[in-house]
């Protein structure tokens, strides 16, 4: 995976690579952007988990729906994770940190990898309820899909207000 900030216009606002990785690991949600079936933009907020062993991101979703139809037609995506933000009204600006990931989505994973992705999601979002979560995964596995974002590159940007 390449941390590529060459296309960021404001080079003075680069998010240090270690902070970008932190957002990948700890960010709560992001916006997945793709091309719709009608060739327009389509973006949705979605929970995620970054797998640092494989440098990929897992998402869970239903077994069918608009997102999967869009990705079947065009699997190239962008995923934006927003970290801390703060509107600074008296300075007419916003402090922020964000990461943008570019890659391709794989929507046909093996059952083993789907379970692995769901287990990682439990570790991130429900660590105190993992045992119950694992039982829930098995009960609802037939109606739960997991998709994987294969990361080609990512970049990070921030604005710090002092």
Image (tube, rainbow, N blue to C red):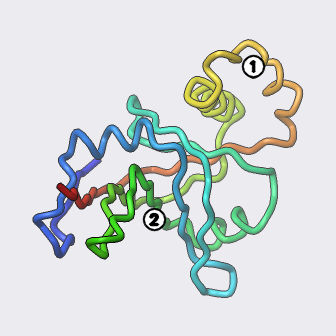
Q: CA distance from mark 1 to mark 2?
A: 30 Å
Viewport quadrant of the C terminus:
bottom left
Q: Tag 2 or tag 1, which sits nearer the N-term?
A: 2
* Horizontal side of residue 26 vs 144, given as left or right: left
Q: SS of the residue at dot 2?
A: strand
**Residue 143 picture location, percent across and down:** 86, 42
* Quarter of the image where one finds residue 133: top right
**Marks 1 and 2: CB-CB under 8 Å?**
no
Residue 34 vertical position relative to residue 82 in the rendered view, above or below: below
* Quarter of the image where one finds residue 132: top right
Please name the residue shown 24% across and 61% down the image.
159
Residue 11 badge: none
* Horizontal side of residue 117 vs 5, given as left or right: right
Badge 1, how many Cα within 10 Å: few under 14, some, many 20+? some
Q: SS of the residue at dot 1?
A: helix
Residue 78 badge: 2
Quick one: 114 or 93, which is closer to the camera?
93
Quick one: 132 or 53, which is closer to the camera?
132
Quick one: 99 or 158, which is closer to the camera?
158
* Quarter of the image where one finds residue 17: top left
**Residue 139 picture location, percent across and down:** 89, 26
Please name the residue shown 57% across and 72% down the image.
74
Quick one: 153 or 26, which is closer to the camera?
26
Judging by the rendered image, the residue that carries numbered circle 1 is 134
**Residue 56 picture location, percent across and down:** 45, 43
Residue 124 vertical position relative to residue 158 in the rendered view, above or below: above
Residue 143 vertical position relative to residue 159 in the rendered view, above or below: above
Please name the residue shown 79% across and 51% down the image.
62
* Horizontal side of residue 45 vs 102, given as left or right: right
Badge 2, how many Cα within 10 Å: few under 14, some, many 20+? many
Please name the residue shown 39% across and 29% down the image.
53
């Amino acid at each position: 995976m390449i941390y590529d900030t060459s296309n960021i216009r404001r080079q003075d606002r680069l998010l240090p690579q270690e902070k970008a990785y932190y957002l990948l690991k700890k960010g709560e949600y992001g916006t997945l952007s793709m091309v719709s079936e009608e060739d327009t933009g389509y973006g949705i907020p979605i929970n995620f988990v970054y797998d640092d062993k494989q440098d990929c991101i897992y998402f869970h979703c239903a077994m069918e729906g608009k997102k999967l139809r869009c990705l079947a037609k065009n699997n190239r995506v962008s995923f934006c994770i927003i970290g801390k933000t703060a509107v600074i009204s008296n300075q007419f600006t916003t402090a922020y940190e964000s990461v943008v990931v570019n890659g391709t989505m794989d929507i046909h994973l093996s059952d083993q990898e789907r379970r692995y992705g769901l287990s990682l999601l439990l570790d991130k979002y429900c660590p105190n309820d993992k045992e119950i979560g694992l039982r829930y995964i098995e009960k609802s596995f037939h109606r739960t899909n997991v998709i994987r974002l294969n990361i080609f590159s990512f970049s990070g940007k921030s604005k710090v207000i002092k």
